[in-house]
Amino acid sequence: MSAAVTLVGASHRTAPVEERERIALAGAEADAATELLAYPGVDEAVVLSTCNRVEVVAAGADLDAVRCSVRRWLTERGQFDDRWFDAHAYELDQQHAVSHLFRVASSLDSLVIGEPQILGQVKQAYTACAEAGGTGPVLNRLFHSAFHVAKRVRTETRIAENAVSVSYAAVELARKVFGRLTGKKVLVIGAGEMGALAVRHLRDAGADEVHVANRTRDRAVEIAAELGGIAHGLDELPTLLETVDIVISSTGSQRFVVKLDDVKAAVSRRRYRRLFLIDIAVPRDIDPRCDSLSNVYLFDVDDLEKVVAANLAARQSEATRAEEFITLEAREFEAWRARAKVVPTIVSLRQKLTRLKDAELEKLRRSNPDMDPAAIDAAARMAHSLINKVLHEPTIRLRESSQSSDARTLVHAVRALFDLTDDAGDDPSGARDPS
Amino acid sequence: MAVLVTAALAILAYSVSCAVYASDIYADRDPTGVLSRVVVHSSVALNTVLVGFLAIDGGPRSLLTNGNVLAVLALVLGATFLVVRERWPIRAAGALVTPVAALLIGAWMVTLGEYVGGRAPTLIVAIHVGLAIIGIATFVVASVLSVLYLIQERQLRRREFGRLFQRLPSLDVLDDAGFRLVSAGFVIYLIAVILGLATTLRSGHGIDVRSWLGIGALVVFGAVVGLRITAGWRGAQAAKLTIAGCVTMVLVLGLYAVGVA
């Protein structure tokens, strides 16, 4: 069974987009995996290609051969030389490759830590390559471990919580003011894209009535149709401020669109219900003095960026916890891989002795046709028991050796002593989980 | 002896609860959440045992004599918090409610010698004191929520979006829960004050400083409720007024506990 694992690739950390796009695959991962299997030493391969990375995870019996083949495939594909490779790509072997894949799947290596898409992309790449016959026992096990650790990271840490986009930060702040946003009324002023995006997020969070105010009424009608809201002119702002709960402003105006006096008047008329104002325009649309009014909370684009920065910092600290899970899971995979080195030999040895036993019993039956079947059964039981006893110690020694450097020597010795050369390496039985 | 040991254990349990709730604000992970639930329930259970001992010792009405009132108030406060915690997502309030309960039991231990032989009150006085205890406990929890409201609002105003900001509930939740508690406490305490005044006037005694202060606190809470209903008054001002009412209430309680007329 192939036991060496290597990971070769380039990501947003090592190569700019114009370099990454030279090797990007865009949906052709399965073909790439099939191509890779034709290279010397590559027994299994999965190719992951996203906008931030192109990585090949491959397994084979000979680590050097696998690594060289994958490197050659990548350089041929991107048509670049070794210097490019040394500058922009990385090669990780064995436990480093395993840990890296776990980090990628868990979104610790993503541009935005904790983003949810990467796990789906890894799953998709694995499924495509597996269906194309690119995976075997090692990569199957490796990727399932990666999915497991990614799930743990998502459920047992807070890595995926809190907004990391400015438009979603507005929703998070609104939640800190109102709690649930169900039934809240939103007013969007202007035609800015970010404002519209924030409104969509608010809608998803439960806000149910959207009003759109714009300098030109036609444009307001247009945006309102897009957002499923009601169109208004800017002259209606003072009235609207009395009824809505959340205001998002993103006009191109050079003067304040929402004035202090309008908000002040609205506050008492709305019986001091909280008013949440988001100003994402530059220059600002809402008079900043509004923030000093009772039950009025005004945030500008800098404030939203502060929320994002704080959330990113929180995710970073959760990433430290996530690394612990990754270390544990990588150790477990390494132990499995070590056991996998000796299991085919143990299985071959047992099969060989069982075959010998069966042959001897057959010989016994032929040479003594009148022999009592009960006696033959007794002889079979004795032979079986003898095999178990003979194999007990060697099996234990081999399993123990899997955690040390003696494994290879012992495996070779056993294979040589019992003439197991025919059963070496890719014995299908080795494909089973040795644990 | 058993009473004192139970009281000491209850203080310890409330203190541990406070520590767990405080760490809960920063950790906010499920194991800590479960732990906080376990320790606060244990604290209230120990407090119940303490009050049970006192009731067995001197009869149920002895619970409402000056000194014992503190232990009963601690229990009602703990129980009120448990109820409120189930209704609103305000676990963080536990970090402030539990030390108050611990302090009340501590105060009961300090004043134990003076009041253990206190005269059992009449039924009307017992009802007056009982309702006052429930009212005060409700106001204390409401004040704790007001404190949290002011902290959370301050963080919003100062753009401090750290861990504490993430963990504390929204302004609406704190405001809504606080208002409901003040409203409930106001009705209960109003009945207690009416009963107290009726008893005092019937017995021919004048209204003392404590009673005036109690009425003053009632007026403050009445203002919080009235202004909210009539003018929609809420937010930081309402929170500050609730805290002021509670401070007055605590002063009244302190005067009663030390027996100042």
Image (cartoon, helix red, strand yellow):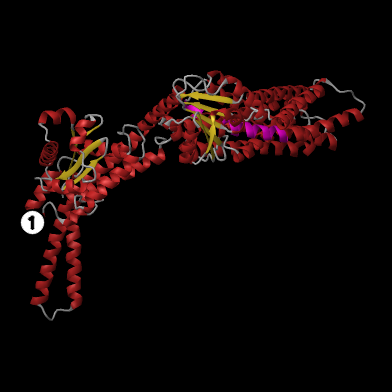
Q: Name the spot of residue A9 as percent of width and height, x first.
A: 20, 36
Q: Is residue A152 visible?
A: yes
Q: Is residue B193 magenta?
A: no
A229 or B28: nearer the eye? Answer: A229
Is A256 above or below relative to A144? above
Q: Residue at x 20, y 50 (%)?
A: A135
Q: Is residue B181 magenta?
A: yes
Is residue A285 found left or right of A90 in the rendered image? Answer: right
Is B245 above or below relative to A178? above
Asked which quadrant contains residue B65, the reply is top right
Secondary structure mostly seen in magenta is helix
Asked which quadrant contains residue A77, the reply is top left
Instruction: Determine crowd level at label 1: few under 14, some 14-19, many 20+ residues with C-alpha closer than 10 A.
Output: few
Q: Determine whether the residue tagged by mark 1 lies in a helix, strand or loop.
A: helix
Letter of the chain that mark 1 sits on in the rendering? A
Q: Residue furthest bottom?
A: A370
Amino acid type assigned to the residue bearing label 1 in the image: Asp
Q: Residue at x 75, y 29 (%)?
A: B222
Q: Name the spot of residue B218 as percent of width and height, x first.
A: 77, 27
Is residue B125 found left or right of B17 in the rendered image? Answer: right
Q: Is residue B63 visible?
A: no
A203 or B134: nearer the eye? Answer: A203
Q: Name the spot of residue A13 as percent of width and height, x first.
A: 25, 29
How many callouts does the rendering have?
1
Is A280 above or below relative to B88? above
B249 or B172: nearer the eye? Answer: B172
What stretch of residues is rendered in magenta? B162-184
Is A335 above or below relative to A266? below
Asked which quadrant contains residue B64, the reply is top right
* Residue bearing mark 1: A422
Is residue A149 found left or right of B48 in the rendered image? Answer: left
Q: Name the spot of residue A189 as percent of width and height, x first.
A: 50, 30
